Image (spheres, helix red, strand yellow):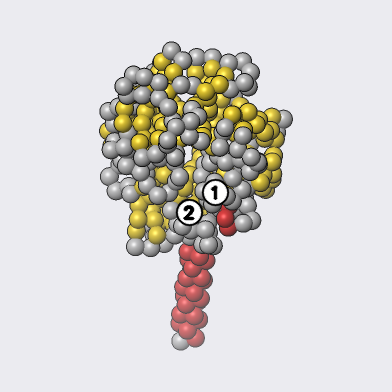
């Protein structure tokens, strides 16, 4: 009888220990799965803590892995919350570090041109007579204050030996500027739908948000008040190409009409929250995967396109990394549950890094954290 009691006590202790361990796992992060059997495309997770102390800087608009570090976006150019400095997470030391002063209100995008990491200056903290971009030089971002009337700089592109910048400017100015072999940027004229030079006088909002090259053609996405249009570069001017207002459906997770874009094999992929593809910036196909509510980000790794999807659930979101296949289908690579929406992601070939927390989540305890999936 005594042996039987001891056996029962031992079994009870084992049950308590198992329950304690299971509870610890469930409480470890907002993105842990509660399922005892985890499918192959799911993974246990851990967080990297936010790179900025202020909650107002916790929206990670974009991420870029570069030379052993993870660089993150921050700030808010609409509400004028400047990050002040650029921050990166160094994998070798597992620590955050500053890497240059950023006198702009938002680090919204990372761009690589000629093997240099750059940041377009979304909104200068200095006067608006000149706009900025930043180049990682000798391990720190260096300010280049060069864009005339550059209230905002949203994108940068090299094309036909010219350096182009997509700007937000005041009425009467051109929203795209370019230069050859120096930083003396000149405005690029716009040619309107009627074939004559277009004046931006009388408009309140004059912005070029995106520059992208499909095949041999450079396109610009331009907003003139309520008009969202595509322009095609031709013989030194941007010529009206198509009306985008009713072709692209936007979302509320970014201030940009196109959150991210990628070009593969002559096809451009753009996410506005919905995922679109186009070969000519005129005809668009909505290829948003079934079951995905918001496509937050795109990236190309080893000539393969991946997307970051969000699906609303009763308890938050299901986050998904999907791969786009050559037969135009999608394959789920990773899924994980989260209290918060995902905003951006990066991949180093071994780990997925997913930034969680959007503009409406700034006061949540997990906002600005980066979820790591192996």
The nearer-to-camera label among 1 and 2 is: 1
- Gap in angstroms between the C-alphas marked 1 and 2: 9 Å
Judge whether 359 appears above or below 85 on screen: below
Q: Measured from the top left, where is residue 106 in percent x and y?
A: 57, 44
Looking at this view, is 83 or 203 the one in front? 203
Judge whether 57 appears above or below 131 on screen: below
10 Å neighbourhood of mark 1: few (<14), some, or many (≥20)? many
Q: Measured from the top left, where is residue 26 in percent x and y?
A: 47, 64
| Lower sequence index among marks 1 and 2 | 1
The picture quadrant where one finds residue 149 is top right
Q: Secondary structure at mark 2?
A: loop
| Left or right: residue 89 compared with residue 340 | right
| Left or right: residue 331 compared with residue 344 | left
Asked if one can make out residue 44 in the rendered structure from this viewpoint, the answer is no
Name of the residue lying farthest toward the top? 235
Q: Which residue is mark 1?
A: 76
Asked if one can make out residue 27 in the rendered structure from this viewpoint, the answer is yes
């Amino acid at each position: 009888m005594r042996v039987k009691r001891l056996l029962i006590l031992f079994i009870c202790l084992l049950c308590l220990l198992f329950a304690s361990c299971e509870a610890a796992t469930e409480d470890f992060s907002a993105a842990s799965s509660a399922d005892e059997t985890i499918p192959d495309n799911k993974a246990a997770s851990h967080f990297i803590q936010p790179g900025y102390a202020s909650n107002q800087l916790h929206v990670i608009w974009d991420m870029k892995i570069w030379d052993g570090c993870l660089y993150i976006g921050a700030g808010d150019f609409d509400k004028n919350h400047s990050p002040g400095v650029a921050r990166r997470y160094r994998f070798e030391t597992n620590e955050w570090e500053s890497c240059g002063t950023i006198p702009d209100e938002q680090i919204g995008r990372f761009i690589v041109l000629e093997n240099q990491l750059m940041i377009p200056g979304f909104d200068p903290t200095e006067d608006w007579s000149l706009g900025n971009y930043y180049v990682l030089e000798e391990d720190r971002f260096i300010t280049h204050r060069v864009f005339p009337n550059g209230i905002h700089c949203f994108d940068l592109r090299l094309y036909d030996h010219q350096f182009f910048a997509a700007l937000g400017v005041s009425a009467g100015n051109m929203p795209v500027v370019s230069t050859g072999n120096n930083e003396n940027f000149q405005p690029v004229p716009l040619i309107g739908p009627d074939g004559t030079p277009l004046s931006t006088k009388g408009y309140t909002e004059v912005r070029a948000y995106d520059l992208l090259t499909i095949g041999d053609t450079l396109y610009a996405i331009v907003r003139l008040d309520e008009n969202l249009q595509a322009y095609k570069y031709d013989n030194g001017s941007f010529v009206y190409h198509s009306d985008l207002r009713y072709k692209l459906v936007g979302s509320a997770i970014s201030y940009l009409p196109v959150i991210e874009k990628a070009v593969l094999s002559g096809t451009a992929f753009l996410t506005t929250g919905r995922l679109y593809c186009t070969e000519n910036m005129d005809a668009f196909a909505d290829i948003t995967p079934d079951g995905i509510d918001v496509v937050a980000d795109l990236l190309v790794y080893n000539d393969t396109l991946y997307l970051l999807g969000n699906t609303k659930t009763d308890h938050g979101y299901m986050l998904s990394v999907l791969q786009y296949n050559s037969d135009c289908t999608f394959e789920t690579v990773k899924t994980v549950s989260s209290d918060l929406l995902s905003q951006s992601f990066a991949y180093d070939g071994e780990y997925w890094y997913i930034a969680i927390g959007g503009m409406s989540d700034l006061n949540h305890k997990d906002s600005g954290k980066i979820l790591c999936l192996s």
